[in-house]
Image: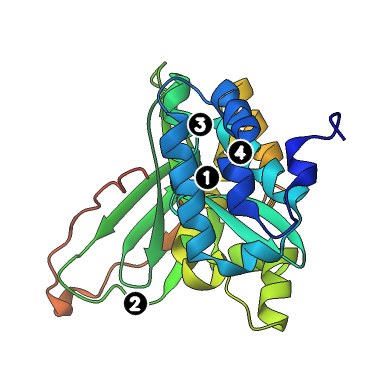
Amino acid sequence: METQTQAAIIPRKDLRGLLNSDRVKSEIARALPTHLTPDRFVRVALTALTRTPRLADCTQESFLRCIMDCSALGLEPDGRRAHLIPYKDQCTLIIDYKGYVELVRRSGDVAAIRAETVCEADGFEWENGVVTHRINWRTSRGEVQAVYAEAKLASGETQTAVMTLDEINAIRDRSQGYTYAKNNKKSHPWMTDWAEMAKKTALRRLIKLLPLSVEIADAMDKDDDRLTERNVTPVTPVKLALPEPETQIEITETQEETATEGGAE
């Protein structure tokens, strides 16, 4: 019928045809911010379909919802800033660590933001909201013990959030998408990009302490990997010992992670 939407008359499996339809391209163009072009966005989404063939089994409605959410946020579903992940017959959107960093920096309220993993051989202290982190990049850092996120606001104030390995993995284990992928031997960002997802989890906790723009609040709401959090940032100092002096390891300052993730609660 003439009143049917174009999405409704395209065969269910033909998501490529859906993306290339004039109607959908027009909707994407209206939603995208000015720094992205519709043609490039569609090309990135088509690449996502090639990279993850199981997306073809998802409903058009769920796929289109994720595409439009990405468009509204100005995040390409490129597997770095945002992921399109099949969950049964539904397409789900997982915003990466790098995607959140991009959104926060875009807001203008934050001068600098980062998230880092803390490993056994690192020197690390968290006390009264102040993080000191030293890494020797010339030797093995050992296993991850914690993750933290830190932001310096435009006002000069600094906010931090620290999470232990157990806290991160407890959140991972409550993710329906991760549980489904694990039980059905499928791929999931928590399996392929654990560090980025862990950083994202700490970053989401930190974001709740920051001035939230509408754009960031929308991103947290649209992220299908979201979970109800409880604040478990330590209220007492957390210290990981430096390597013993006899190891004679040179300690250098940690380097800031460049923006552009993944990674969730």
- Taking the spot 29% from the left edge, 72% from the top edge, the residue there is 141
Q: Nearer the viewer, mark 3 or mark 2?
A: 3
Q: Which residue is mark 2?
A: 142
Mark 3 vs mark 1, CA separation in Å: 19 Å
218 vs 252, left or right, is right
Q: Point out the image quarter for the N terminus.
A: top right
Q: Which residue is mark 4?
A: 21
97 vs 6, left or right, is left
Q: Which residue is mark 3?
A: 74
- Taking the spot 64% from the left edge, 45% from the top edge, the residue there is 18
Query: Which disc number belongs to residue 203?
Result: 1
Taking 112 as reference, is 86 above or below it?
below
Q: Are marks 3 and 1 in contact (CB under 8 Å)?
A: no
Of callouts 4 and 2, the N-terminal one: 4
Q: Secondary structure at mark 3?
A: loop
Of callouts 3 and 1, the N-terminal one: 3
Q: Secondary structure at mark 2?
A: loop
- Taking the spot 65% from the left edge, 31% from the top edge, the residue there is 23
Of callouts 3 and 4, the N-terminal one: 4
* Type of amino acid under label 3: Gly
* Type of amino acid under label 4: Ser
Query: Which disc number belongs to residue 3?
Result: none
Measuring from the top left, give residue 163's x and y in whole percent.
55, 56
Q: Nearer the viewer, mark 1 or mark 2?
A: 1
* Type of amino acid under label 2: Gly
Measuring from the top left, give residue 96's x and y in whole percent.
51, 50
Mark 3 vs mark 4, CA separation in Å: 20 Å
Of callouts 1 and 4, the N-terminal one: 4
Other-residue count near label 1 (Cα within 10 Å), few / some / many at <14 / 14–19 / ≥20: many
